[in-house]
Image (cartoon, coloured by chain):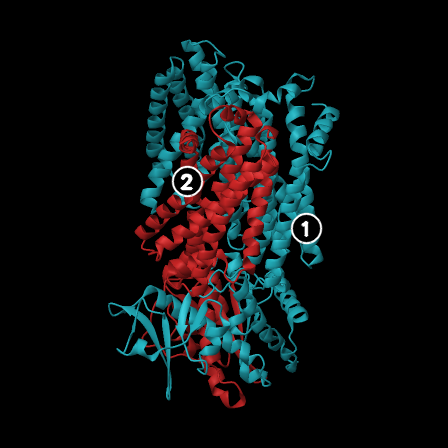
Chain colours: A cyan, B red
Amino acid sequence: MRPKTLLRIARWEATKGFGGLDRGAVAVGVAAVAFVLAVGVVGVVGGVAIEDGIYRVGVEEDSDLYGPVADDPAFAAVEPNPEAIDGGGLAAGGRYDLYVEDRPGGARLYLAESGGEPTEKSRAALAALRGSIDRYNDRRLSAEDNASAAFPVTVTVRYVERGGSEVVAAGDAGDASGADDGDSTTDGGAGGTDGSSGGGATGSDGGTTGTDTETTQGATGGDTEGPIGAPSLGAFDLFGTAGTTGTPSDIQPPFPFQSLVLAFLFVLPLNFLIQAYGSSMLSERLGRRGELLLVAPVGRADIVFGKTLPYAAASVSITVAIVAGLRLLGGEAGLLSVLAVAPLTLLFLATTFLGSLFARSFKELTFVTVTITTLLTTYAFVPAIFAETSAVAFVSPLTLAIKDLTGTAVTPGQFAFALGPPTLVGAICFFFGLGLYREEDLFTQRAIQHKALDALAERIRRPRSVAAVVVLLVPFVFVAELFAVALLFALPVAVSIPLVFAVIAVIEELAKGLPIYAGFAHDRYGRTLPVSLAVGAAAGIGFFLAEKLTLAVQLVGLPGSPVADAAFQTGFGAPTPGVIALLAFAPLALHVATSTVTAAGASRGRSTFVLGLCSAVLVHVAYNAAVVSRVV
Amino acid sequence: MSRAAIARRELGSLSREKTIVLALLIQLVIAGFSSFLVVGLTSLYDPGAAEGDVVVGVTGEEADRLLAAAEPVDGLDARPYDPADAEAAFDRNEIQAIAAVERRGGRIAVTVDAPQTSLQKTLVVVQLRAALEELERTERSARSEHLSFQPVSVSVPASVDASPYFGFSYAVLLPLLVFLPVFIGGAVVVDSLTEEIERGTLELLRVAPTSLTEIVEGKAGVLAALAPIQVALWVLLLGLNEIAVANVPAILAFTTALSVVAVVFAAGLALAVPVRQRAQLSYSLGMLAAFAAAALLPEHPATTVALLAIDSATPTTYAHLGATVVAAIGAAAILRVQLAAVDAESLG
């Protein structure tokens, strides 16, 4: 790679089409401005209330309940018609889901019924109404002069480490600063009446944050009106630290809701970026446009990384801009957030690069891009939800960003655990993709499976290089296995463990078998028995060595759940040194044996390869069932 | 006739590349993901999902009041403790939290110590909050003579359980499943047209006895028609999961209208900017901008879908539906007029 040519290609890529203001650039600019404006407008209007008026309540305007109903956008107050409750009940399918009848002794509530039972909708409406009444009361009471009668109970929640019985300093500091933030920014004045108790001031904030929750609920989407009280998303409580002191309705369960939403800010631009990047890469393949660069005296790596660099740089600068914006708003985001997003960028770009080499048309590329977006966003988000509660969260780099946003420290081990795997996977995707960046694969309509074999075979020169390719595939094996564990985790252990064994056997044998087959199919080595043995041994040893890296997984502290243990066979649960030694080397024998079986099949042709692979999987499953389940 | 031939060809290429299958799979993943998020998160808060009660040790001079308030809360077991015993019990994991209740300046001050690292702490806080809110209600009514506003309360015929996912299914999940196919349909129109132009195959098509109008309408028509079909499938699937959707014809009409507007926008963009990268970026940014800006309408389109599905439609909802249909017809007419004026030779 020569930096000078790389940079020149990067400059071409970045300035392509910006020479003059052509229609395309104008269209993108207009759309981007419209997008920013529209989002700004939504921000000013106060979010999109999707639940607007989904429950219809028949209520008189002078009823006590009119206030709570009218204040909550989820309800539509409808003029009541007493005929609706003539039969002593409210029939479903009419104009009301709930009906309030004012009587001298107090209001009576009717739920829409069908077949004598309240409908699901009316019950949901009632649950929503209860919450709405509580918020309405709090809001009205916050205007009371006598604050201690209006809010007679104050609550402080402290998170304490078990065993030590001492309050964790970080949590405590967070509490205190959180309460301060709330005071200084949202104090409506009413809370100032009570100087002696800090709780009084935050108590009155409860009213304002309560309304925020209402208006932003729809915009954030992932929330229900059920028992989850979504913490407020108001601009003044961005970091979710407030609310640990206050009235009972102020305290929020520990859940990094705001931080998650903020972290989404980091991932959102990546989706647009890979769209542009994928288009650019694929359009090189249309009409042999890329040929000009390919025949020029520059290396493939220069071309690929030169074309990638502007997008990576754009991502970094967008992240820096977001971090700077958050800091201006008083957030704690910093360098760690930028570092956390970098491997995600690499992963997004690398998978898109590979996708654009495989896609046969723009249509297919769109679906590939959407798939990448969906899967990688899931990968980044689902673990990050548990940022406050579980070490598994560090599987995702986004957890680091959340820790950064909430001002929590991160150990170097966690840092490496979160950033290492995505960086590695991204780098390997680029490595395999580079193998495909050549005339035969770029400009011809080869079937996807052939391209995949091309990518593998490109890295195989002789039997022992199979080992290196298998090693490179191991991160993908882990990703696939983690995915399987995540999917099967919810099942009962009696079902999930055998299933995990089977799925893992298939994944691991495929990872060893495909490079072997690719080598035979591309005539990288002869189709003889000694070669089969050598290739099988190489694949087995390569896989074994790479797999032992999982020990690192255990060291960083993936919790010892039985499913995770079954997946990674670390054998740490074993009782004696002899067993540990056996567990350490038995897999080596297994991997060599099974991949030799596959290699023997692959040397004869495609159908025997499938046959060999199936027998290898069966042997693997039998081994797992016999050895692992007995010892662990 | 040639319009149908183009449409058939377009459909053929979609099914040959199996992208339609992929599209449905993606939607399934997105729907599954969002449901997983909500169901998973709700179960963190759901007392029914936990094994056994949350046990809380209550200490302090006013402990009795909290103990009384905790009585009616399901899944919460509040026990009186001495402060020292409570800490020991907390360390031994016999109780999940300590609540110290004191009287301070005319108020009741409760300090809750919850475990720092535990998946259960969410549930502990939620359960304790229920008890504390009950306590607040009791204390408030005891001081009601000092208040000018009397808190509203509601007497319910009987205790009723509500599904916490009810609002989510209609207000988030269903609109998501309506807007995704619409969005993807337009994106595919952009791809399909820009690819023909960039590859230079549009010229070949035009050698055949077809006009540009027929080509564009054939391609856009297929994708506009695919969206309501997908939505119909989702409605069926939701029905199997006991989420009954009301006003299905109206929802499908709304989807069709939206999808026509989307593909017209996409086709117009693709012809104006016949470079995929630019056109696709403008399309997705533009669509998101339109979706956000729709908040300025009297009713957001997502709300329209939700209100129709949950059977709470108002006259505004139907007015919205009508206006969208009119907009779709208008957009299609404008596209046809514009296409007649486009000089096909000028496209690559």
Q: Foreground: B181 or A500?
A: B181
Dot 2 falls on a residue whose secondary structure is: helix
Report if the CB atoms under discs 2 and 1 are less than 8 Å apart: no
Q: Which residue is mark 1?
A: A323
Look at 42% across and 36% down and name the residue there: B20
- Quadrant showing the N terminus of chain A: top right
What amino acid is labelled 1 in the image?
Val
Dot 1 falls on a residue whose secondary structure is: helix
- Decide: few, some or many residues near mark 1? Use Cα within 10 Å; few <14, some 14-19, many ≥20: many
Question: Percent x, y for residue A631?
Answer: 37, 37
Location of residue A494 by image quarter: top left
Compute the Cα span from label 2 to label 1: 35 Å
Q: Which residue is mark 2?
A: B25
Question: Percent x, y for residue A140?
Answer: 54, 79
Of all residues shown, which one is farthest toward the bottom? B145
Task: Please give the chain letter of the residue carrying mark 2.
Answer: B
Dot in front, 2 or 1? 2
> From where the camera sits, is residue A275 visible?
no
